[in-house]
Image (cartoon, grey):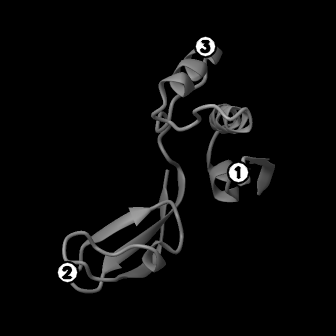
Amino acid sequence: MKYIRGKANDKEMEIVMSHTFIRNNPAETILDVLYHECVHYALFAKDQPYRDSDPSFTRTLDCLGISRTRTHMYRGESHLYECRKCRYQFSRNMKEYEKRYICRRCRGRFRYVGVVERS
């Protein structure tokens, strides 16, 4: 679900929230995360530092009473992956991780195992 799309300095940015996230979290959490993302967007559009690690970004969040990154416990669908070579397993909240990354332990490729519910 796309909420906002914008352009600054020939770069595009959009705010996307998954249906799974919305379905599995209380309204208070959803709004807090959306406000956090809106601060990213507003600073990006004004060509100001907008990354989580930028001091001006964290100051803006603090002034507005908005939570910082990774404040809320993730609830919803998670995707389980396994290294084909060393059998290391882990889960991520994103799909298609196996197409973009390799195992840092053995440099092997990942395979998608399936969906895991986190509550």
Q: Residue at x 53, y 49 (%)?
A: 75
Determine which residue is flagged by label 1. Answer: 13
Determine which residue is flagged by label 2. Answer: 86
Task: Classify residue 45 as left or right of residue 114.
Answer: right
Kindly identify the amino acid type of the residue bearing the numbered disc 1: Met
Are the residues tagged 1 and 3 within 8 Å (C-beta)? no
Tell us which disc is closer to us: 2 or 1.
1
- Residue 82, by quadrant, is bottom left
Which quadrant does the N terminus fall into?
Answer: bottom right
Q: Give the secondary structure at mark 3.
A: helix
Question: Is 53 above or below relative to 58?
Answer: below
Tell us which disc is closer to us: 1 or 3.
1
Determine which residue is flagged by label 3. Answer: 63
Which comes before the other along the chain, label 2 or label 1?
A: 1
Outermost residue toward the top? 63
Residue 109, position as x, y percentages in the image: 33, 83
Kindly identify the amino acid type of the residue bearing the numbered disc 3: Cys
Residue 22, position as x, y percentages in the image: 68, 49
